[in-house]
Image (cartoon, rainbow, N blue to C red):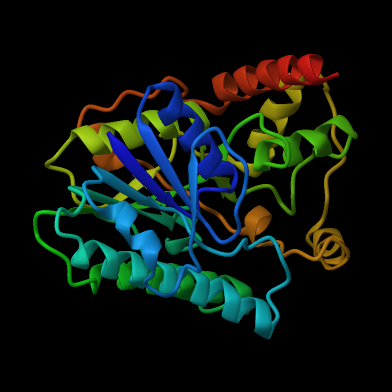
Amino acid sequence: MKIVIPGGTGQVGTILARSLQADNHQVVVLSRKPVRAAWRVAVWDAQTLDIWAEEFEDADVVINLAGRSVNCRYNAENRRQILESRVNSTRVVGEAISRASHPPRLWLQMSTATIYAHRYDAPNDETTGILGGAEPDAPDTWRFSIDVAKAWEQAMDEAAISPHTRRVKMRAAMVMSPDVGGVFDTLLGIVRRGLGGRAGDGRQYVSWIHYEDFVRAVYWLIEKQEIEGAINLAAPNPLPNADFMRELREAWGIPLGLPATKLMLEIGAVFMRTETELLLKSRRVVPQRLLESGFGFRFPTWESAAKDLCRQWRENKHRTG
């Protein structure tokens, strides 16, 4: 297949491109800047049509991952960039698809599990899940993330493309891989320093997906032509933060980790130029539609995933010295 990945230079895009290239597919990544890669890279600005749109001709699949990193403080300028980078890039991808003489048969659009409400009582699936905004006392930063997620998906829904191009919105949880700089690498660094205790009261649920299952799920969505609309890409067993961190410590071989209170996290976030939402919002998300379609997870539990990721992280560290 020919697969075009707008915004594919980040961690998730690199994971996908690497796997697709290894399977002998033709991969084209759209990037704001020219970068060296084992696959072809075309430059775009993620907001206006240009020569890059020619890549969509005769492409089989477009996987749009474009969007500014949310690992920052949510000041006014960063909020503008986070929102506009997602909405504008999604809109222009839709325009490129609509103008192609032979458009791709599938548009996979990245979204986020953050679109669901903060809750403890029950999991959020695609059918009965509560979309965010149901918690009146939620911090302003949480409401902003939900608004961005909704606008992101709306931009895809409003795209005037041929009905022959199938649309799937991937509401992805945190993709865990052993790659340097990723979410897992960051969490493991905290554990290795003895600070891997619970965050806040530890009751908030953590949703996640092993990167191998994420790649397999993308292949599954490509193959299953009956699947359209919103799909949760998350392992089927989210767990409270306290248990999540305990199982990560056990996988690494460290019995104890210092907990961090909510106040400590807020202070730390200021110095690290980030937000506490990723740690404190309860993301209890389950992949109902994936499971109902017959998809099987290689890593359905965090215990098995954490052990495998720790093993791979050690192997990578050994190879690189």
Q: Position of residue 7 (x, y in %)?
A: 50, 55
- Please name whichever residue, 246 or 32, is drawn nearer the observer in this view of the structure: 32
Q: Is residue 179 left or right of residue 259?
A: left
Q: Position of residue 107 (x, y in %)?
A: 27, 52
Q: Position of residue 38 (x, y in %)?
A: 55, 32
Residue 137, compared with residue 225, is above or below; it is: below
Residue at point 74%, 49% (across, down): 199
Q: Is residue 297 left or right of residue 304?
A: left
Q: How many marks?
A: 0
Q: Is residue 72 left or right of residue 291?
A: right
The quadrant holding residue 162 is bottom left
Q: Is residue 134 left or right of residue 293?
A: right
Where, quadrant-wise, is the C terminus in this rendering?
top right
Residue with the most extreme front position: 51
Residue with the most extreme bottom position: 76
Where, quadrant-wise, is the N terminus in this rendering?
top left
Q: Position of residue 66 (x, y in %)?
A: 48, 59
> Can I make out residue 134 in this image?
no
Residue with the most extreme left position: 163
- Please name whichever residue, 11 or 195, is drawn nearer the observer in this view of the structure: 11
